[in-house]
Amino acid sequence: MRALLSVSDKSGIVEFAKELEALGFEIISTGGTFKKLQEEGVSVIEIDKVTKFPECFEGRVKTLNPYVHGGILHKRGDKAHVAQAKELEIEGIDLVCVNLYPFKATIERTDDFDEIIENIDIGGPTMVRSAAKNFNDVLIVTDSSDYSKVITALKEKADTLEFRRDLMIKAFEHTGAYDAMIANYMNSRFNSGFGAKQFIVGNKVFDTRYGENPHQSGALYEFDNFFSQNFKAVKGEASFNNLTDMNGAIKIATSFGDRNAVCIVKHGNPCGFALKDSLLESYTEALKCDPISAFGGVVAVNGVVDLELAKKMNELFLEVVVAGDFTDEAIEEFSKKKRLKLFSYDSEKLKVAGDKIDFKHIDGGFVFQNSDCICDNEVTNAKCVTKLEASKEQISDLEIAWKVAGLTKSNCVIYVKDGAMVAVGMGMTSRVDAAQCAIKKAKELGLSIEGSSLASEAFFPFRDSVDAAATAGVKAIIQPGGSIRDEEVIEAANEHGIAMYFTTVRHFLH
């Protein structure tokens, strides 16, 4: 039996090679892997002794040779294949262990295109594909975490067809993701990220019990190991809907840096938000906005949940609390609620990956775009278009309202007072309906909008929304501007003594 080992990531390769050697495998290797194994006392044959041809062109050509690929690809159960291999003096290669040139690490480290090109693996993917194609006869290993599993299977004669098939699938995933990464990088560099093909590749983290509904299947996939390195299940199992709701809540809660933000989300939209001096105060004020919707909701806490906050949260049925972390006392307190799920980022604060891309499935395909960014300077640089300017406190509330509005389903309006959201209207087909719905709900809950600041994620097409806001007591408004009726809207604000700011940036979220 012969095994060909050629890896970029050499972690565990020496131990793997020694185990294979002990099982009777003859080891063949290339370049740096050969040197490493030889230094560690493994009896190893250099690849050019097999190919009968030296490595050439600065190592660009090493394994692209019939003695390698014939040894991998010929079918052991086919008499004609076996006879031809014997005639051509091609010996079988029964195990191939390959991982590829570090293209990702290279593009993260340098912009030197010549170096990047040299870190595109050619021979490696070819060997992986050859071995994967002939998985019936050849074991293909592309992940160092599988080394012990492969050794165990060989020792126990458990390298079944099903076992090999699983490795085959993993191998094609490996080369598929590698090629996708190269294509996406080239399109990013030369076509502004919008080439003729767009590849979206994720690594599976776990299956969810089901999808949005029990009759659907679901799973979480990640980019760049974000969830497997950061996300921690403290109590309970995250469902498909939990994950999407947490995503919305976390994005809002982390929009304010390290400040003590708390966001409550129900069905993907915020029903409470506050930014106060303490997390307890932030949660308490956030809950006031809509405690009815908060029932069974998801709460994102940008910090560590302590016992006092946990006791306050336990006064209401919540489905999920996600936080930077939890104290042991808080976890013990939450254990009283059997259905409550807890998730953390094992950190002082919540974390976001900061993905640069965004996409949505539509029937027949997907739409793809750069990720939206609600930047801190949008409020700082907003232009006052009215006679009256906002106070320092109102500017602070406008910032909160603006960021929450940009992460809430359109059409939406957000009312903020003293650092807490006091009313929200979202997902409406009419902006004036969103404004009126928010006011109506606030009144029903006994919340005063008098003196609040309002944000709309897109421009007001008519003055009616401003008139409605004035009736409710709004004192400051922030919006993108850009309507053909901007002058009418500004005039309405001046009539009502409202300070109005234009950001010139729209944040639709559909």
Image (cartoon, rainbow, N blue to C red):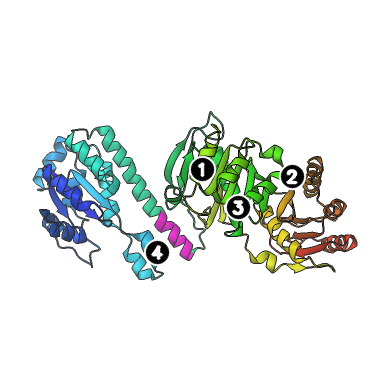
First in sequence: mark 2 vs mark 3: 3
Vertically, is 320 above or below 388? Answer: above
Camera-side mark, 4 or 3: 3
Vertically, is 256 above or below 427? Answer: below
Q: Quadrant of the N terminus?
A: top left
Residue at figure coordinates x 77%, y 49% from the top left:
431
**What residue is shown with label 1?**
329
Q: Is residue 186 magenta?
A: yes
| Secondary structure that dominates the magenta span | helix
Q: Does residue 475 appear left or right of residue 332 in this picture?
A: right
Q: CA distance from mark 2 to mark 3?
A: 23 Å
For disc 2, the neighbor class at 10 Å (few under 14, some 14 to 19, many from 20) is some
The x, y position of residue 306, in whole percent, is 55, 47
Q: Amino acid at mark 2?
A: Met
Pick out the residue farthest to the top: 215
**What residue is shown with label 2?**
428
What label sits on residue 107 in the rendered view?
4
Camera-side mark, 1 or 4: 1
Q: CA distance from mark 1 to mark 4?
A: 44 Å
Asked whether residue 252 appears in the rendered view, the answer is: no
Q: Amino acid at mark 4?
A: Ile
Q: Is residue 353 magenta?
A: no
Q: CA distance from mark 1 to mark 2?
A: 42 Å
Q: Amino acid at mark 3?
A: Ala
First in sequence: mark 1 vs mark 2: 1
First in sequence: mark 1 vs mark 4: 4
Q: Does residue 196 appear left or right of residue 162 in this picture?
A: right
> In which image quadrant can residue 48 be found?
bottom left
Residue at figure coordinates x 34%, y 45% from the top left:
172
For disc 1, the neighbor class at 10 Å (few under 14, some 14 to 19, many from 20) is some
Secondary structure of the residue carrying tag 1 is helix
**What residue is shown with label 3?**
253
